[in-house]
Image (tube, rainbow, N blue to C red):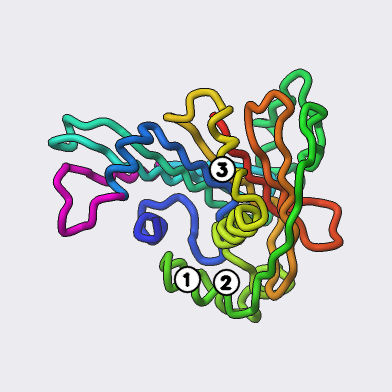
Amino acid sequence: MLLLLASSRCPVDPIGAVNVRNRFEVKDLPQCRRLLDQSEKNLKETYNIVAMLPKEATPVKRGIETDIIVSIMYGVSPTQSTEIYRQTFTVLEFVKTAGQPLNASKQTPPESGKSHDPDATSARSVSTMSTSFRMERHDPYGWAALCKDYNPIHMSPTVARLFGFKGKIAHGNHVVAKAVESVLSESPAWIDDSKDIPGTLQFAMEVVFKRPITVPCELVATQITQRDKSAVEFNIALKGGTKPSVTVIWGN
């Protein structure tokens, strides 16, 4: 992803840009598990990674966005292969504009029956449990070493403030990973809920980063299960806060 963002063909400037949404799609769970079970040296099957970068960015209220799509393909060659996993990274570059929002002409009305409030919880859902966890001041350094995302808004409080943040912000995916770890430690049986979601051999996890999370801080992850068990949702918010900073939806 970082190589694509650094490419001269990337339609957004990666310096100061933020990852606002991620979608993880498992299209062939057994094949993904086989890949994870094989070490790099003992890889007996053929896998390829394909990455796509759009030519143009999409105007939105806060600036411009672009989607970076990375797929894992299984097959004897890139032309004779099947997609088994896809991850879509949505990256936002903040752009100041005068007057109307950039996306004013592209606004679409909410679907019928859906709330206009992005922070509202569906009437079909019920809160089942919550757990708290901490993000420490040094956490972004460890996560950056793992994922190689050294964006200065995660590394330097000074640079982060120059881009309008209150301080150094956590990596969104690190927050999600810690939230899932915290929930599973409190309720190990939660992972079994996936058996009630139709089509679990092919499923997706949608992550929406709604508000930046400045470190250090304490967060609360609240599990919200749809009444019809069509999805499992987490809202991650600052402790004592009323609006979620991150929403995670697990389902189809």
- Helix, strand or loop status at disc 3: helix
How far separated are the C-alphas under marks 1 and 3? 27 Å
Q: What residue is shown with label 2?
A: 154
Main structural element of the magenta stretch: helix, strand or loop? Answer: loop
Crowd around label 2: few <14 · some 14–19 · many ≥20 (10 Å): many
* N-term mark: 1 or 2: 1
- Which label belongs to residue 191? 3
Whole-number angstrom distance, CA of label 1 to CA of label 2: 8 Å
Marking on residue 94: none
Q: Amino acid at mark 1?
A: Ala
Reading the image, the residue beneath label 1 is 144
Q: Is residue 80 left or right of residue 180?
A: left
Picture quadrant where residue 153 is located: bottom right
Earlier along the polypeptide chain: callout 1 or callout 3?
1
Whether residue 18 is visible to the viewer of this picture, yes or no, is: no
35 to the left or right of 207:
left
Name the residue type under label 3: Ile
Per the image, is 35 magenta?
no
Question: Quick check: marks 1 and 2 in contact, CB under 8 Å?
Answer: yes
Which mark is nearer the camera, 2 or 3? 3
Please tell me which residue is depicted at 70% across the width and 51% down the height of the picture.
210
Q: Is residue 222 above or below residue 135?
A: above
**Residue pushed farthest front?**
189
* Quadrant where the image shows the N terminus: bottom left
Tell me which segment is drawn in magenta: 37-54
Label 1 CA crowd tier, 10 Å (few <14, some 14–19, many 20+)? some
Q: Quadrant of the C terminus?
A: top right
Dot in front, 1 or 2: 1
Number of numbered labels in the structure image: 3
Judging depth in this view, the residue of 55 and 139 nearest the camera is 139
Residue at x-position 48% and y-position 47%: 89
